[in-house]
Amino acid sequence: MHRYVKPPLLEFVLMELATFTCQTFIFYMVAVLSSDLLSDKDRLVAYVSSRIGNIAVQELLIVVPVSFLVVGMLHTLSDKYSSRWAKRLIETVLQDIPRTIYLFGSSVAGVLLALSTFSHRSADPSIVTGSIVFLSVIAAITFFLYGCFVSYILK
């Protein structure tokens, strides 16, 4: 089994940023396509609500700590039984935590960007485009930095 060598920090961050950007684009395109190319406001709002409702945010706040709890339990078991399999499982679960953060963050950023695109195209006065763009950028930066930091620490 070979030992993982961390890439240089800039290379690591750029790769993580590319991954996060691709995931954001995927959610953006799902929102675009699920709303008939941003022509159906009701379907777009329904999709946005399903992705960034209170449940999604609560899930993220719960998933990350619970993931660490599961890792702790697996670590305790692997120490007690000296299992290589359990150690590999721990590594895999740890590597999934940043991916989970990226999944939630890119989902929020992607659907907010789709909503801002819709607002800009339709000039709908009930949606404030600038605020949505600002929120999507803040969400993207926050989730990316959090996920990237966790990923770098865990590798």
Image (tube, rainbow, N blue to C red):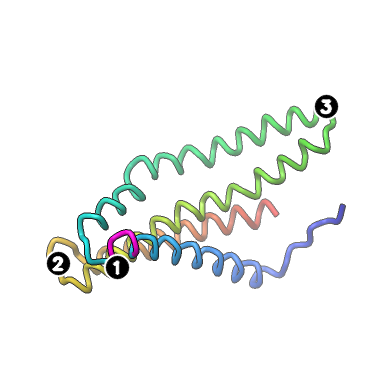
Point 13% across, 61% down: residue: 126
Q: Is residue 27 inside the magenta stretch?
A: no
In this view, the residue in front, 122 or 66, is: 122
- Residue type at mark 1: give it: Leu
In this view, the residue in front, 98 or 23, is: 23
Residue receiving disc 3 = 81
Give me the C-alpha separation between circle 2 and circle 3.
Answer: 61 Å
Numbered range of the magenta stretch? 33-37
Q: Residue furthest front?
A: 36
- Lateral position of residue 3 relative to residue 100, left or right: right
**Label 2 or label 3, whichever comes before in sequence order:** 3
When the figure is inspected, residue 14 is found, relative to residue 5, above or below; the finding is: below
Q: Which mark is residue 37?
A: 1
- Lateral position of residue 143 relative to residue 7, left or right: left
Residue receiving disc 2 = 124
**Label 3 or label 1, whichever comes before in sequence order:** 1
- Residue type at mark 3: give it: Tyr
- Residue type at mark 2: give it: Asp
